[in-house]
Image (cartoon, grey):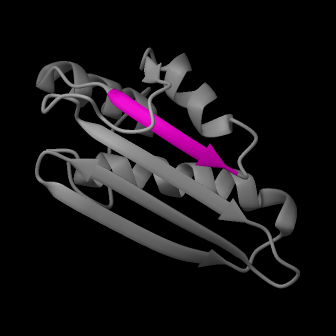
Amino acid sequence: MGNAIYGQNEDTLESLIATRMEVLGHSLTVVEGGLGSELVRRLERAGIQTNALIQPTAEDETTFKETNFIPGQWQQNMWAFLITPEGLYELHRSYGGPAQMGTAWAVNTALDFVRRNIA
């Protein structure tokens, strides 16, 4: 649908990722730090089976995704890396909002990053 509007009605970021991954016949490997496994939980609730591998093992493995979230006193920092057959994508974002919302912000930002970058 685009970058600003990603879905309608019951669509979620993770459901759109799941649909795209199924169409492509790809799988997802996730390494997550600082998010309390929330990213993996949301992906798995959408039906995406995440691999416990450190790197993709075959060309048809869609992505290796690493997300690291580091809370700070004044701002939180998030780094995300996505490796697809098309190449490497990197994202660094800082969040200056309420610390208690930092994890939710980082998970949603990471999911949107994947949605925008899977072919």
Decide whether residue 32 is among the magenta residues. Answer: yes
Image point (36%, 39%), residue name? 55
Q: Residue furthest bottom?
A: 74
* Magenta-drawn stretch, dominant element (helix, strand or loop): strand
Image location (x, y in percent) of residue 76: 72, 73
Image location (x, y in percent) of residue 33: 66, 50
Q: Quadrant of residue 13?
A: top left
The answer to whether residue 30 is left or right of residue 57 is: right
Q: Is residue 18 visible?
A: yes
Image point (67%, 36%), residue name? 38
Does residue 100 lie above or below 91 as drawn?
above
Magenta region: 28-33
Image location (x, y in percent) of residue 117: 24, 53
Does residue 31 lie above or below 52 as drawn?
below
Decide whether residue 74 is among the magenta residues. Answer: no
The answer to whether residue 96 is left or right of residue 25 is: right
Work out whether residue 5 or residue 77 is closer to the camera in this orientation and state it: 77
Image location (x, y in percent) of residue 107: 59, 49
Image point (47%, 60%), residue name? 80
Work out whether residue 6 or residue 51 is closer to the camera in this orientation and state it: 51
Work out whether residue 46 or residue 92 is closer to the camera in this orientation and state it: 92
Total numbered badges shown on the rendered structure: 0
Does residue 12 lie above or below 81 as drawn?
above
Q: Is residue 12 visible?
A: no
**Quadrant for the C terminus in the image:** top left
